[in-house]
Image (tube, rainbow, N blue to C red):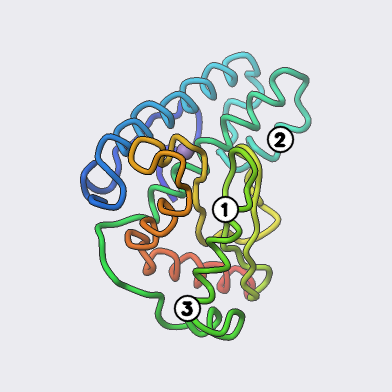
Amino acid sequence: MTENNTYPFVNLPLPYAYNALEPYIDEQTMRLHHDKHLQTYIDNLNAAIEKEPRIKLLPLKQLIAYADKLPQPSQNIIRNNAGGVFNHRFYFEQLKNPSDDKPTGVLMQEIIREYGTFDKFKAELKAAALSVFGSGYAWLVADGNKLKIITTPNQNVPFDYCLLLNIDVWEHAYYLKHHNLRADYIDDLFNVIDWNKVEQRYLDCLASLKA
Ligand code: MN
């Protein structure tokens, strides 16, 4: 996970160029998504923490867990903005330049076991992403060692599971290039997923089961 995990949060650079995902995800979308949208979540989170000094030392995941104990409006502001920071870092970190790579190793074994083929898995993940009403995410998660596809609204983070992959279906993730065609964005996104990163997350999940 990204460094800079406590207040004051700063927006670390993308681990690749803004145009690295072309032609599937365009440079302008990446600039706006990272430099404006993620930056706004970071600025709003820092401002909200300023008003709740007792949570200043908490790392991101604990901030989200602790948000429920805070009075309003801090509760909603921290949940939405800490979630926004977590979800976007997670999303950007799992992308890379275009390739036709597929998962390998134990992750691919589990995909085949659960979904039959890689194409069937992609179809199911796409259907989940299309099913999100309004803004939110589709996720590939691990429940123990078992793979699951779920969705979450807004900037919620499904920390009940071990997180492997998220698909941001907020319109700001695709509207400049794909307009209202969320399905085309999802098809394009499959060309820029770093499956090595996703598999490493799954291996970390499995290792944490044994710990
Ligand atoms: Mn987004």
Q: Residue at x 42, y 37 (%)?
A: 4
Q: Count neighbours of disc 2 (C-alpha within 10 A) and say few if under 14, some if 14 to 19, many if 20 or more.
A: some
Q: Is mark 2 within 8 Å of ligand 1?
A: no
* Residue underneath mark 2: 66
Q: CA distance from mark 3 to mark 2?
A: 38 Å
Taking depth in this image into account, of 100 and 95 the one nearest to the observer is 100
Answer left or right for 195 relative to 140. Answer: left
Q: Is mark 3 within 8 Å of ligand 1?
A: no
Judging from the image, what secondary structure is the residue with disc 2 in?
A: helix
Nearest to N terminus: mark 1 or mark 3: 3
* Residue underneath mark 3: 118
Q: Nearer the viewer, mark 1 or mark 3?
A: 1
Residue 163, x across and y down, in percent: 57, 59
* Residue underneath mark 1: 130
Residue 187, x across and y down, in percent: 41, 59
Q: From what the image shows, is residue 109 above or below residue 160?
A: below
Taking depth in this image into account, of 41 and 129 the one nearest to the observer is 129
Q: Nearer the viewer, mark 3 or mark 2?
A: 3
Residue type indicated by callout 3: Phe
Q: Residue at x 56, y 85 (%)?
A: 116
Q: Residue at x 63, y 35 (%)?
A: 63
Residue 113, x across and y down, in percent: 59, 85
Residue type indicated by callout 1: Leu
Nearest to N terminus: mark 3 or mark 2: 2
Q: From what the image shows, is residue 182 above or below residue 6?
A: below
Query: Is the C-beta separation of discs 2 and 1 under 8 Å?
Result: no
Query: Is the C-beta separation of discs 1 and 3 under 8 Å?
Result: no
| Disc assigned to residue 92 | none
Judging from the image, what secondary structure is the residue with disc 3 in?
A: helix
Q: From what the image shows, is residue 139 above or below residue 81?
A: below
Based on the displayed image, in which of its 4 quarters is residue 199 positioned?
Answer: bottom left
Residue type indicated by callout 2: Tyr
